[in-house]
Image (cartoon, rainbow, N blue to C red):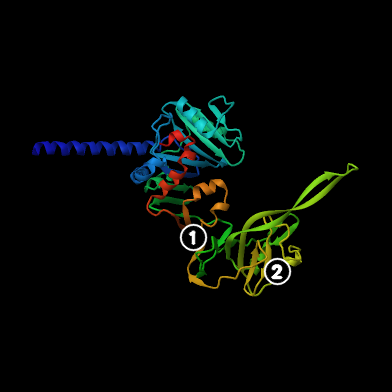
Amino acid sequence: MKRYKTHLFIALLLLGVVFVILYKNWQSRSYKFVVHADANRIVKVDVCEVAKTLLIDDVQYSKKDTEEGNTIRISTTSNGLRIPANIFFYTVPKAPKTIFCTLKAVNIEEAVSFLSQKLQINIQSESTSFFLKTNEKRTISMAYLHNTIVLAYSFQKEDITSIFSQILTEGHYLTPNAPLFKKLKEKEHHLQFASLAGGYFSLDATKGQIALNGTFPPHPDIEYSTTTEIPEFDRTTPIQLFLAAHLKKKEKDTQISWKNHFVSQDSLLTSLQHHLFLRMHGFTTQQDSIIRYEYNDNFEKTAKVSLQEKKVPSLQIDIPIKNNNNVLSYLKNQQLLTKDHRIADAPMYHFYAQQTEKDFVISTTKTFKKPIDKRIASTAFLKLYIHLPPLIHELPNPVQSYGASIEKIHLIGKKVSDNRLYIDGMITFNNKEINALTQLLKKNATKLLGDKNMVN
């Protein structure tokens, strides 16, 4: 009996060693031949950590959700893709408005067919050295050759064929020991971001919340102010933002312009303190003038003006003034204010301005809220609080879908040195018992996969 236990222990030990070796090899292989050699920003999604989270929570969901058809177990039907330990999204300086992702296939025909269907890529484009397909809007592209597929999403039109060619025909890949990869290998997180500029960001989901933190280099054109106290946020206003930062003063005065209006940047910087407090209290209505052109009985083109109501955010921005400077008078002299104190030709919404003893205030309504007098000690240059439930039904459908399970978002930013900013945040969900990642995928699995048959 003792010999049997010894043999069993040795067998289990060997099995564990083999598993660790295979796991390490799987991880190591995921960094090879997947990112363009010139990549300057990389987002890493740890498939292992995500799968581990979903498996742990699957038991909790399956008990009460299987009958509802809401579990997130994925069908084992082959899609032709090789499952990597990590998936990488990256950008390249030659095409800064495009995000790329390289995938490997075990069956290239099945993989291309699967991705074409899910991403609605159905237009075959001409290419001499590799195969290329795009969607109708030309925003999503898929290039492939042999067992390698490169996906690209472009925010605006730019030439990306040379980048496809460098990857697929020249093998122009980032080496596994490159500095960006080394940073991403240091710790395990659900999601990580690293850039050549020195930025790093990680995201981890736990029960009922997503924690995010990172460090970034300051923007060269922005001065981040040092604070000792900030406004005390309440828990009823849906969106609140404190920001202690401003554009750096340049040697030559810069003119801020829109339409036919001009404002001196120096005049504003010397009149206003270098921080602001923004609040969104919900929504309000504004009237827009709609101009239509019609032809009269004499076939003359005439303009017809009508008013149309629209729903807009109820925003207010409070900016402390310096040395009792009269910002309102300056804007009037520049002919930037109408008789009812509306900022002339402001983009997007109608903004109204007023000045109190301490603050210059801008609002999308004529009824201004009282300033926040309470202060708390803090060295943060940034603080953001969003309480989603009061806003969720007014937001666009994609945001509603993903945001319905979220309760609030907190974000804090601090300047830790002259060349380093620290960001720390938390996304809190309504359900505090289930992992936040599971909650997001449970509600949106069908949309993400595009087929109910893929969600068991």
Measure the alpha-carbon separation of dots 2 and 1.
31 Å
Q: Position of residue 364 (x, y in %)?
A: 65, 61
| Residue linked to disc 1 | 413
Q: Secondary structure at mark 2?
A: helix
How dense is the environment of label 2, judged by Cα within 10 Å: few (below 14), some, or many (20 and up)? Answer: some
**Residue at point 47% right, 53% down?**
406
Q: Secondary structure at mark 1?
A: strand
Q: Horizontal placement of 275 versus 75: left or right?
A: right
Look at the picture and state if 405 lies above or below 107: below
Q: Depth check: give the residue in front, 426 or 101.
A: 426
Q: Position of residue 5 (x, y in %)?
A: 12, 39
| Residue linked to disc 2 | 328
Displayed quadrant of residue 49:
top left
**Residue at point 18% right, 36% down?**
11
Q: Residue furthest right?
A: 298
Q: Are marks 2 and 1 in contact (CB under 8 Å)?
A: no
The earlier-in-sequence mark between 2 and 1 is 2
Q: Nearer the viewer, mark 2 or mark 1?
A: 2
